[in-house]
Amino acid sequence: MPAKRELTMRQIRQMLRLARDGVSAREIGRTLGVARSTIQDNLKRASTAGLAWPLAGDLTDAVLEQRLFAHAGVRRGFRRRREPDWASLACELKRPGVNLMVLWEEYRAVHPEGYGYSRFCDLFREFERRLSPTMRQDHPAGDKVFVDYSGKKIMIVDRATGVVRDAEIFVAVLGASNYTYAEATWTQTLPDWIEAHVRMFRFFGGVPRLVVPDNLKSGVHRASFYDPEINRSYGMMASHYGVGILPARPRKPRDKAKVEAGVRFAQTYILGRLRRQTFFSLAEANAAIAAALERINAHVMRRIGVSRRQLFETVEMPVLAPLRGCPGFC
């Protein structure tokens, strides 16, 4: 382990003065608010460097630090070997057939002196832990889309009567790219539920392998860990598009983490930004939602340095199944 300097130069000067006065390492640690082991380590360094109180008047902080820590090894946060762009690898890992062994072999081809496979995997997992929980989940491109309704609603005002009616917010999130779709529907009933799926597939321009709903009654008659019962019309729609329905398992929150994160985005980016606007029709509301979606999907995700749209277009869209016509569902 490389040595770590956890004291400021002012604290080190105070430490040396207290040590000269016969104060124990434990008491010095209490005075400075650090562990006794830290004081012991720094006193040992000072002794090795031939430093004791009083220090020379012309000994600057920079020179003091150099004498104490010149041989501290690799500085904290510094890697001995060349590292790959972990964010880029996180995106590549979503491509079908790509795993860490493939990425490591490509890395070593460019950097023969680079990390071994085991250390490479450890460092990648460290990077993954800094991502959001939904980004850490391993969803291959084109595999799943997570769908649900937001618990928050959007108000539509009847221009003629002034009566306010609440509309539901349907949200869908693709597993690999986090590419998000949302729209307002009047209800959560079966016709609105199915039509929202049809428009979602159009928005994506293709169909993933599976749709993962959160056991909404419109789509799932009976939730079950092993054999959920799908609504017949919902099943017909899935058959038409060649997509499977895999309801999120009861009491398995990770199954629906993607869409729950998408719901939070919808509530923040859409409802939060549109809260002061008044809508007089569902079409007006959906036009505003579409504009908000553009911002969501164009926003660069901080940890991986690309937007949802870029990730969708480069990784996910090419492997979606072709979009079929929609007779009977449009």
Image (cartoon, helix red, strand yellow):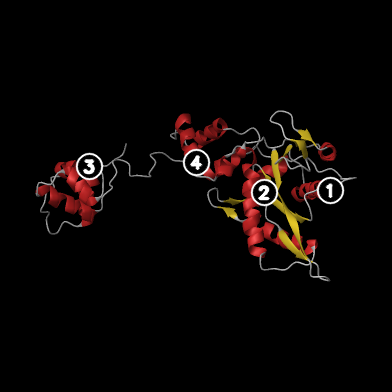
Residue at point 45% right, 32% down? 119
**4 and 1 marks in contact (CB < 8 Å):** no
Residue at which label 4 appears: 129
Q: Secondary structure at mark 3?
A: helix
Query: Relative to the observer, which residue lies in front, 266 or 9?
Result: 266
Closer to the camera: disc 4 or disc 3?
A: 3
Q: CA distance from mark 4 to mark 3?
A: 31 Å
Q: Quadrant of residue 325?
A: top right
Whether pointer 4 and pointer 2 mark residues with C-beta atoms closer than 8 Å, the reply is no
Residue type pointed to by label 4: Arg
Q: CA distance from mark 4 to mark 1?
A: 41 Å
As helix, strand or loop, the secondary structure at mark 1 comes to helix
| x then y, percent, for residue 267 | 64, 56
Secondary element at tag 2: loop
Give the amino acid type for the residue marked by disc 3 in the picture: Arg
Residue ID for mark 3: 36
Label 2, on which residue?
A: 179
Closer to viewer: mark 1 or mark 3:
1
Q: Residues within 10 Å of mark 2 (few under 14, many from 20)?
A: many
Q: Which residue is mark 1?
A: 191
> Mark 4 or mark 3: which comes first in sequence?
3
How far across and how far down the image is residue 144, in percent? 69, 39
Residue depicted at 59% across the width and 43% down the height = 134
The type of residue carrying mark 2 is Tyr
Which image quarter is the N terminus in?
top left
Task: Pinpoint residue 167: horizontal percent, then vertical percent.
Answer: 75, 57
> In the drawing, does residue 235 fall left or right of residue 302?
right
